[in-house]
């Protein structure tokens, strides 16, 4: 499956992300964390970064608040996507963070402090512009 994560065909990539989220449900999240951490930082393919972040979004939607013990690891893995050079990666990162926040409503807001500061800083400098945290 890992070969299809940066496939040219969007349908194949989307099916792969669904399959990985089901694997995360079956094998438990800690089994996939090392893989997701490496692929989310892949410098060669924006599609691989995009789809690995999308896997985390699907895990949040699929598992609900059952991943609460892994929330800090998941946020840490994808937060750098807000600074990615590709707009699609920045957008899916924001959507994934929103899915994680929605799934853990009223439980782990302090875990999102680093990304909330990043959003706020970015908005103050560039209101109504594209996502992305500035250094």
Image (cartoon, grey):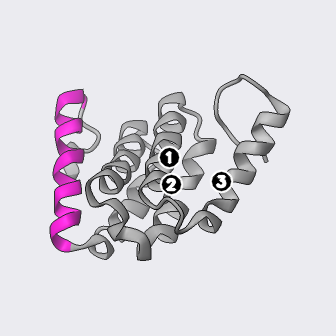
SS under mark 3: helix
Q: Are marks 1 and 2 in contact (CB under 8 Å)?
A: yes
The image shows residue 23, relative to residue 44, as above or below, that is: below
Q: How far apart are marks 1 and 3 (CA)?
A: 11 Å
Q: Mark 3 points at which residue?
A: 115
Q: Do the residues labelled 1 and 3 touch (CB within 8 Å)?
A: no
Q: Distance between the residues labelled 3 and 2?
A: 11 Å
Q: Mark 1 points at which residue?
A: 98
Mark 1 is surrounded, within 10 Å at the Cα level, by few (under 14), some (14 to 19) or many (20 or more) other residues, namely some
Task: Give the percent coordinates (x, y) of residue 65.
Answer: 37, 65
The structure residue drawn at horizontal position 65% and vertical position 54%, both measured from the top left corner, is 115
Viewer-side label of 3, 2:
2
Q: Do the residues labelled 3 and 2 touch (CB within 8 Å)?
A: no
State the image quarter where residue 114 is shown: bottom right
Task: Give the percent coordinates (x, y) of residue 14.
Answer: 23, 37
The structure residue drawn at horizontal position 79% and vertical position 48%, both measured from the top left corner, is 135
Return the mark for residue 101: 2
The structure residue drawn at horizontal position 23% and vertical position 37%, both measured from the top left corner, is 13
SS under mark 1: helix
Residue 133 horizontal side relative to residue 44, left or right: right
State the image quarter where residue 11 is shown: top left
The image shows residue 30, relative to residue 75, as above or below, that is: below
What stretch of residues is rendered in magenta? 8-27
Q: Nearer the viewer, residue 21 or 135?
A: 21
Q: Main secondary structure of the magenta part?
A: helix
């Amino acid at each position: 499956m890992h070969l299809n994560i940066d496939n040219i065909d969007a349908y194949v990539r989307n099916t792969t992300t669904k399959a990985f989220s089901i694997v995360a449900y079956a094998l438990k999240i800690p089994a996939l964390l090392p893989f997701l951490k490496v692929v989310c930082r892949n410098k060669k393919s924006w599609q691989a970064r995009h789809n690995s972040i999308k896997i985390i979004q699907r895990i949040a939607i699929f598992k609900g608040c059952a991943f609460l013990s892994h929330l800090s690891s998941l946020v840490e893995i994808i937060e750098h996507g807000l600074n990615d050079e590709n707009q699609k990666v920045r957008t899916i990162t924001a959507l994934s963070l929103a899915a994680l926040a929605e799934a853990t409503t009223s439980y782990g807001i302090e875990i999102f402090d680093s990304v909330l500061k990043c959003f706020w800083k970015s908005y103050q400098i560039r209101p109504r512009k594209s996502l992305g945290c500035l250094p």
